[in-house]
Each structure stands twice: as structure tokens, then as C-alpha cells.
Image (cartoon, rainbow, N blue to C red):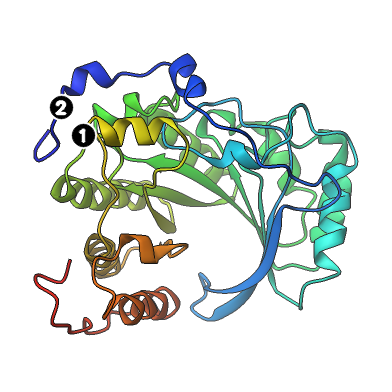
Amino acid sequence: MGETPGDFDSAILTTEAIMAARGDRHPVPVDRPYAFFVEPERAAHGGVVEVATLFLSNSECPFRCLMCDLWRHTLDGPTPPGVIPQQMRFALTRLKPATHLKLYNSGNFFDRRAIPQEDWPEIAQLARPFAHVTVENHPRLCDDRCLRFKSMLAGRFEIALGLETIHPTVLPRLNKEMTVDDFDRAVERLLAGDIAVRAFILLRPPFLSEVEGVEWAIKSMDHAFSRGVTCCAVIPTRAGNGIMEQLEAQGHFSSPRLSSLETVLTRGLAMKRGRVFVDLWDAQRFAHCSRCAEARIQRLNRMNLSQAWEAPVRCRCEARP
């Protein structure tokens, strides 16, 4: 596969192999989210809004995706009823006011083991002050439950779906247990129910070279927008879950460069088909020049908020890696 060495076909990994490579979970509290904060984000209407983002502590996702490390912040068993509203109250009483709410739960909001349905009314009540509510979910779990929960909300409802990549051989190897057609059907179903959709796109998943990683992230964004998605969030693929380190050692994976993140954001904004964000958590790890890294990350953050191109940061480093 392009610049990536190694035998691609030999790297087809099972759920058992992925789980066997894991380390330990991080202890998470049951009575509060494991992280929560307010952050600015460019909204669909064009202004910058304050978003209360809660990373809920709940049951692990049933899908064992190759690149995922979110299982580290989950409970050992099903989420007890009442726990999610308790976590929301804990966070929301400690955060500054916000107009938008994200409930991210390291998996799928409509997984019964993660978010008990008996908690939906109280969750919806706690979400009533917010004009916009976003949750995350697997495309294959998008059914009538999404519409039932939406009917309880006062504000706009959005579901974030992991498309990851439309690469025809890489997507099956991510062990996500979905196809591009599954994603397309989920988007169609949600849009028909007046539920907005954002897509998570991976930048350089395993088995792709740097150039291919950029190319397929752009193609995947284009596909998502063509299906009616209004926002694409580009996630640089990271090591850190055990199996990714094995793939890295075997030559099947390398983290993307900061320059690739810059290219994908620039190309995504140029499409002018919806909002494009790049994930800047721990972005320093993708930089190869200490002189310009911080300025380049700040530029990307400004572009996230403005949804407008800025001239690149100039530096003495060779080829601006």
C-alpha cells in the first residue's frame, strides 16, 4: 500500500487479537463524567457558540474497532440506571453557561447497556436548556430509538457517526462491523427524521501511507457531504490502545503529520459543503518542528472557529513537516 511496508493481507486482525493486545482500563468515577468542559465551536448558523462537552462514564462499546482506545474510560459492566442523569447534574452545575450540549459516551448513545432507556426522560429534561444536543452512535444502531429520544428534546438534535474512511479495503480491516452502505442508510434515516448528522473521519488509519491518508480523508469527507452530513470532524489516528503499537512496529501504521492535518482542513473548507473541524487534542505529537508547532496549531484552531482559510505559518524547518 504505497509507502507503507509490510504484508497488508497478513494484518487482518480479529476481535480476539485486538482485545488480547489491550492494557488496563483507567478507573473512572460512576457519579460524574470522567471529563467535562466548555469549549467554543462554530455552529451551523455561522456564529461561535459555547458547547458543554461531557465524556460520560458508562458501559464499553460492543464494537471492538481496531483504532479505538475509548474502552480505557469505561465501566466493567452495564451502566446502572440513574447514573447518567447523576453525572450530567454533577457536570452541568459546575460548568459555565453554554448553549450547546455534547453527550459523548465512548461508544453509542443508543446502546442499552451504555445508556439505560429508563433514563431518557431525565436526560432530556436536563438537556432542555440547550438549543442543540449532540450524541455519538454507531450507524448500525440508528433506528426508531433515535426518533423517540429526539421527541423528548426541546432543541435541535444531532448524531455523530463514525464513517472513518470509505477506503474499500481499509474500512473492513478496522473491525467496525459496518460498511459504507450502512453509514449511508443511517444518514438517510436520520435526515428523514429531522436529525442532523456529523461524521467522524480518520486521518491516516492503519495500512495507508501519508499521501494516501490525506487522499482518503478528503474522499471520505466528500462522500459524507454528498449524503447530507453537515459537519465533518477529522481525527488524526493515534497509537495507544495496544494493537496500534503492534501495527506500528510491523510497519502497518504511522501517526499522521501535522502538515497532513493542515492539508485536510484546507481542502475540506474549500469544498464549502459544510463545517470541517480537525481534532487538536495532543496535536503537538504530530509536529516535527518545535519552532513552529504551536503557531501552526493555533492557526488550525482559528480556522476551526472561523471556517475560513488562513495563510500558512512560515518556518525554517525543511518541507514544513
Cα gap from disc 1 to disc 2, whole angstroms: 6 Å
Kindly indicate the quadrant of the structure image that contains residue 66: top left
Image vertical order of residue 288 relative to residue 153, above or below: below
Q: Position of residue 82 (x, y in %)?
A: 90, 41
Which residue is tagged 1? 251
Question: Callout 2: 10 Å neighbours few (<14), some, many (20+)?
Answer: some
Residue, x 23% and y 16% (percent of image)?
10
Where in the figure is residue 165, as x and y percent of width and height? 32, 40
Q: Residue 301: x, y in percent?
A: 41, 76
Whether tag 1 and tag 2 are in contact, CB under 8 A, the answer is: yes
Front in this rendered view, residue 102 or 284:
284
Q: Residue at x 29, y 75 (%)?
A: 290
Residue 250 is left or right of residue 17, and the answer is left
The residue that label 2 is drawn on is 6
Instruction: Say whether residue 107 is visible.
Output: no
- Residue in front for this viewpoint, 107 or 231: 107
Q: Is residue 297 above or below residue 106?
A: below
